[in-house]
Amino acid sequence: MRNRLTFFIFLLTFPIAGFCQTVIPLYDAQIPNSIQTNNIEHWTTYNFLQNVTQPTLTVFSPVENHSGTAVIVIPGGGYGALNIHYEGYDVAKRLNEIGITAFVLKYRLPDDKIMRDKSTGPIEDAQRALLIVKTRAKEWHIDTAKVGVMGFSAGGHLAAFIGTHFNKTSIENINRVSLRPNFMVLVYPVISFTDSLGHLDSRTALIGQNPSAEKVRFYSNELNVTPGTPPTFLIHAEDDGLVSVRNSTAMFLALQKNKVPSGLHIFPTGQHGFPLEPAKSTWFDYCARWLKENKWY
């Protein structure tokens, strides 16, 4: 059954502290690549979301000073959970403050119990989110030439994947809308699935314990950069003990080799996971400056 873009059930709309939020389902019909099951989503003790079965977009629209720019925010969690408050909703509110419309993606996590091919489920949801935002851009006062993605940790891998593989469509796209993000912001991202660089837990979750060399290469984003890859800004901490900073440096070098406009900021300290803690939130200022200097908002 076709997943029409003309009909969506609006689940929830509410204003909070100057931010207008709307939650919409990614699919209005059968979720592709899915095995029918009960809704088994649940929150962990640490406020992570697991077992996502109903993917959605939460729209955060700025009340004023609309820039026409949109960012799809993709939280991380090692492809095993979603840090959706810390790396999603909180970040979206900061984007609203500078006039950017934010879309927080709640995507399906790889799981053989709920999808036929777990390696494509998250990709389908990310591409579907981009398709929705571009197709309904007028509704949110968005310029379709200014739709970017921002990913954290494993969410950075997913964001980078759709940016480096935008010609490989995993979803129905009748009108052939471009699924290339216009820009990418990758924060302490998992970039590579190679043995020497990759975050192996994320790799195992998405493509299994013993993936072929061909599959490892396909999912290693630094090996798939081309001159058509979107302009990219990378942020990482040198002392990150979970996802090596060499993921970001490898991606940056690949972007530079292909003459893709790009920037990289490495903090000497910060470890892994520093979105908006007061002492470490300067990353957002660097991000906003890069976006501004490159006229993305």
Image (cartoon, rainbow, N blue to C red):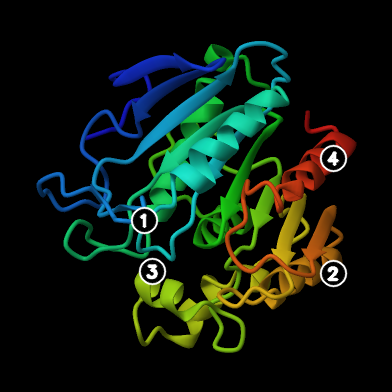
Q: Marks 4 and 1, Cα distance to the nearest angstrom? A: 32 Å
- At 64% from the left and 25% from the top, the residue drawn is 96
Tell which tag, 4 or 3, sits nearer the viewer: 4
Q: Is residue 19 above or below residue 232?
A: above
Q: Earlier in the sequence, mark 4 or mark 3?
A: 3
Tell which tag, 4 or 1, sits nearer the viewer: 1
Q: Marks 2 and 3, Cα distance to the nearest angstrom? A: 28 Å
Among the 4 quarters of the image, the one containing residue 243: bottom right
- At 63% from the left and 46% from the top, the residue drawn is 276
Task: Pinpoint residue 279: horizontal percent, then vertical percent.
Answer: 71, 52
Give the amino acid at mark 3: Leu
Q: Residues within 10 Å of mark 3 (few under 14, many from 20)?
A: many
Q: Marks 2 and 1, Cα distance to the nearest angstrom? A: 40 Å
Give the amino acid at mark 1: Tyr
Q: Which residue is mark 3?
A: 206
Q: Is residue 105 left or right of residue 95?
A: left
- At 76% from the left and 72% from the top, the residue drawn is 249
* Mark drawn on residue 257: 2
Q: Which residue is mark 4?
A: 289
Give the amino acid at mark 2: Lys
The answer to whether one can see residue 265 in this image is yes
Q: Residues within 10 Å of mark 2 (few under 14, many from 20)?
A: few
